[in-house]
Image (spheres, helix red, strand yellow):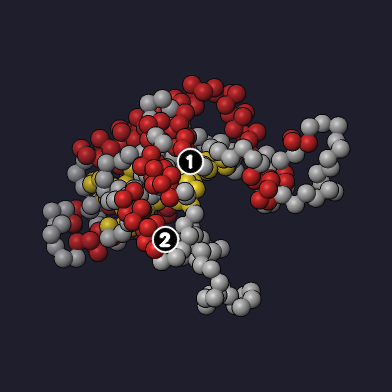
Amino acid sequence: MLWPQAPVPGAPLLPTLLSVSTPASPCPPASPPCALRGKMIPEDLERQISLAEAEGSVPFLVSATSGTTVLGAFDPLDAIADVCQRHGLWLHVDAAWGGSVLLSRTHRHLLHGIQRADSVAWNPHKLLGAGLQCSALLLRDTSNLLKRCHGSQASYLFQQDKFYDVALDTGDKVVQCGRRVDCLKLWLMWKAQGGQGLERRIDQAFALTRYLVEEIKKREGFELVMEPEFVNVCFWFVPPSLRGKKESPDYSKRLSQVAPVLKERMVKKGSMMIGYQPHGTRANFFRMVVANPTLTQADVDFLLCELECLGQDL
């Protein structure tokens, strides 16, 4: 089959690809089970790999995550790297969200084992707050892999007889060729704040996260989904009508309706914006991401008081 028919029914006579599931890729991923915190379980990963190999498939890549979007989980990279080493697989780490903790001496342990990855994705525009967009792909490979994969050697763009070192022409290393100079934003931020300044920004986010968690524990009607590992604080606001009724059969359904109502109210009032979502069998909960360096304890207090005010009649 040819495009556009093939992506829908598939091409069964061709080799299959187990890949990361995205809107641009109809190929199903091989997803090992995760622990309750959203971390990959290395033992289950290895079982999935062995099963795929026994079925005649050829696994070639494992994509781990350092800082998941919802729960802020960090996969156990060292153990996953051991699995990849035993099976000869490429280890990619999606550290887009959590990679910046490497700059903090206090919290970089969350990334233990990342030095064993073959490739790492990192977004300084997230936790560090660099200007959008600022993304990096870091590779262990030193054989000019990106250019070998993506390079078109277009002579009208990348002349080899220039008066300067043509190794500075990096455009032939990426699919889109022309792009903004993302690294300049990070370089300017680093020059302005220094390594210690960026470290303080990360440590401050963790400290404010801990303050929010302790305040949630103190207040009636607030319940943590789980203790946060990162700066993602996931919690429920339980309105007066549902308090003490956790055992009722419709509790989860009714609780799941609370966050959307509160979100509508806060948006229409113009007081704040906080995301919410379900997760597995868990009812809708709020996800407060503590990343803005200008946030203060007073802002956290306002957040909780505002939720109480908006939900007091529910």
Q: Is residue 306 above or below residue 254?
A: above
**Image position, residue 62 (x, y; %):** 45, 51
Tell me, yes or no, if residue 272 can be seen here. no
Which picture quadrant has residue 230? top left
Q: Earlier in the sequence, mark 1 or mark 2?
A: 2
- Local crowd at mark 2 within 10 Å, few (<14), some, or many (≥20)? few
Judging depth in this view, the residue of 254 and 131 nearest the camera is: 131
**Image position, residue 45 (x, y; %):** 36, 53
Q: Quadrant of the N terminus?
A: bottom right
Q: Which residue is mark 2?
A: 53
Q: Which residue is mark 1?
A: 117
Judging depth in this view, the residue of 16 and 255 nearest the camera is: 16
Q: Is residue 208 above or below residue 19?
A: above
Label 1 with label 2: CB-CB less than 8 Å: no
The three-letter amino acid code for the residue at tag 1 is Ala
**Disc 1 on helix, strand or loop?**
loop
Seen in the image, is 95 located left or right of residue 150? left
The three-letter amino acid code for the residue at tag 2 is Glu
Question: For the image shown, how many numbered marks are present on the structure?
Answer: 2
Seen in the image, is 228 located left or right of residue 136? left
> Residue at the location (27% across, 57% down)?
282
> Residue at the location (39% across, 34% down)?
112
